[in-house]
């Protein structure tokens, strides 16, 4: 009886360890994807940032960003915050100018990210920021 109890206890501890490693990998993946997205937006590669969109969302998103856009500031003001086990939200404040007008504009980018367990990748499921 003691052997069975010990075996069940050891198995439970090992399974808890595996779950923790899986969750840690998912969290690390989220941090990495958010850093990459931030860099793409911040350094003006807004069109390339659309590659972070969920493939279904990307087909619907056809807004073109003017080529004279320059992002001057990108600041995460909230998040990332987990909402459930496979969804995270983050809000970023973005300042930008269009080279021809030199008027500073602002937009709040409310991002919703979902983790696809099949591809083990995070995708942006909210619309990308609109620069107008």
Image: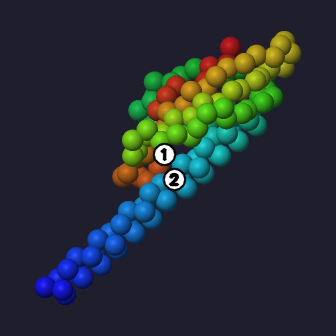
- Quadrant for the C terminus, please: top right
For residue 21, above or below residue 101 = below
Judged by depth in the image, the label closer to the viewer, 2 or 1, is 2
Q: Nearer the viewer, residue 53 or 33?
A: 33
Q: Residue at x 81, y 17 (%)?
A: 104
- Tell me, yes or no, whether the two marked residues, 2 and 1, touch with CB atoms within 8 Å: no
On screen, residue 67 versus residue 64, left or right, reads right
Report the label total.
2
On screen, residue 70 versus residue 32, left or right, reads right
User: Residue 22: percent from the left, percent from the top?
Assistant: 42, 61
Residue 27 — which label? 2
The single residue placed furthest to the front in the displayed view is: 2
Precedes in sequence: disc 2 or disc 1: 2
User: What element does badge 2 sit on?
Assistant: helix
Specify whether residue 48 is in view: no
Q: Residue at x 58, y 20 (%)?
A: 63
User: Residue 53: percent from the left, percent from the top?
Assistant: 51, 35
Q: Name the residue under label 1.
A: 122
The single residue placed furthest to the left in the displayed view is: 1
């Amino acid at each position: 009886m003691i052997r069975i109890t010990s075996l069940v206890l050891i198995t439970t501890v090992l399974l808890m360890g595996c779950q923790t490693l899986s969750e840690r990998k998912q969290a690390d993946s989220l941090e990495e994807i958010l850093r990459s997205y931030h860099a793409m937006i911040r350094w003006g590669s807004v069109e390339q940032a659309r590659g972070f969109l969920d493939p279904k969302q990307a087909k619907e998103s056809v807004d073109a960003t003017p080529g004279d856009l320059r992002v001057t500031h990108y600041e995460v003001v909230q998040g990332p915050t987990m909402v459930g086990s496979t969804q995270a939200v983050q809000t970023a404040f973005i300042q930008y100018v269009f080279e021809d007008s030199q008027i500073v504009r602002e937009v709040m980018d409310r991002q919703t990210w979902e983790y696809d367990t099949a591809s083990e990748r995070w995708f942006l499921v909210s619309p990308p920021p609109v620069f107008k």
